[in-house]
Amino acid sequence: MRSKKSRLAFQFDPWILAASISLLLIGLLMVTSSSMVISERQFDYPFHFLIHQCGYLLLGIIFGVFAFRLPMEQWRSLGAYLFIGCLFLLVLVLVPGIGHRINGSMRWLGFGAFTLQVSELAKFSVVLYLAGYLVRRDEEIQTTLFGFIKPMFLLAIISVLLLLEPDFGATTVILGTALGMMFLANVRLWQYLALFLLVAGALSILAVSSPYRLARITTFLHPWENPFDSGYQLTQSLIAFGRGGFMGVGLGNSIQKLFYLPEAQTDFLFAVLAEELGFVGECVVVALFVVLIGRALYIGKKAYLGQKFFESYLAFGFSFWLGLQAMINIGVNTGLLPTKGLTLPLMSYGGNSLLINCVVIALLLRIGHDCRNLSTTKVTRTRRRRY
């Protein structure tokens, strides 16, 4: 009896665990391959980026263990406080002398050797806060306009702060995730459509009103018209895909990572992977993301059917976030979407992104752990959800 209870106590979802570990290992492999030359040039040591990534991964595992052990009710109560703290940090990062400017954007706060990219924390805090709000104000959201507007007002504030950095990519991911969660909350359809059109219109106006964003859109449509200036990054990425073919040129044999493709270890890691591992490697990575996101959605539905509504919204929110960000990053690399500064979850170089992603995976495992023995035969809610 004791051994059976012990096995149940450590029963994690094998699909999420296997997909996450696989993406992490492939990510470490590709970060090493894509960064060795630039690391040698900048730091006289080929494994500088790998060591930093491994350090953040170790920290992410520690944070993930802590997140897993914390009861979900405590996460629910922490949501509002974390959201308010994130708003304060987003204001703080815009203060000259406090925020760190890198490549024309003020997105980082420095704490000694550690830097915090607040937009990564913002994604997490928005999903956590909104999941709690949708449970607390379930009836109000479904029946009154005010209940629908309140979280949208707070999201508008956080979006404006992100755009002032500027960070258009994080804003898109946050708003897209919030729209998905609000849809599942069964808000009145006309409110949702009005919000969707408002967000789409606002993002479109912002995209064309800024010269550098407009340049990215026009470059995305016609990258080969100016391949050595505004279209340089995208054309180099497309060359990497072309060289990779079906089986790739072999691990470590990429030419584009040799100072041709900017941000090869971060935003354009997938292009280096496509060149070295080919179409087969691309399909493996996409399949792993499909398994991870699909399983997270299944856990979210199972939690809802078991009447764990906070856990359900949280799992759905994390699924939308990871899936949308992965889709945007791959779309940018393949030339299907305009260039945005978004990492590939669990894979690209970036300590803050990796650390937060580890916490997200830990919470998904915890939700799956808590829901493994739930009955999913009946749901006693006032209104049926849209799935």
Image: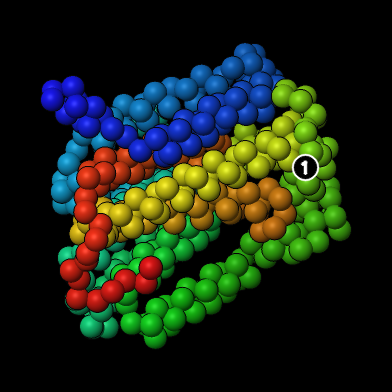
Left or right: where does residue 30 sit relative to residue 15? Answer: right
Q: Residue furthest right?
A: 225
Tell me if residue 128 comes above or below residue 41 in the rendering: below
Whether residue 86 is visible, yes or no, is yes
Horizontal side of 334 relative to 209 (left or right) equals: right
- Which residue: 38% across, 53% down? 298
* Image quarter hosting the C terminus: bottom left
> Where residue 379 sits: x, y (%)?
22, 66
Closer to the camera in the image, 360 or 59: 360
Q: Give the quarter of the image for residue 70.
A: top left
User: Which picture quadrant has residue 370?
Assistant: top left
Asked if residue 119 shows in the view, the reply is no
Q: Is residue 47 above or below residue 26?
A: above
Q: Is residue 380 above or below residue 376?
A: below
Of residue 354 and residue 384, the one placed in the foreground of this image is 384
Residue at the spot x=16%, y=46% of the render? 74
**Residue situated furthest front in the rendering:** 1
The quarter of the picture where the N terminus appears is: top left
Give the x, y percent position of residue 52: 49, 23
- Image spot of residue 235 (x, y percent): 80, 48
Disc 1 on helix, strand or loop?
helix
Residue located at (67% from left, 17% from top)? 40
Q: Mark 1 — residue?
A: 241
Q: Residues within 10 Å of mark 1 (few under 14, many from 20)?
A: many
- Residue type, mark 1 in image: Phe
Q: Position of residue 347 (x, y in %)?
A: 54, 35
Q: How many marks?
A: 1
Q: Is residue 181 left or right of residue 245?
A: left
Image-based side of 142 in relation to 52, left or right: left
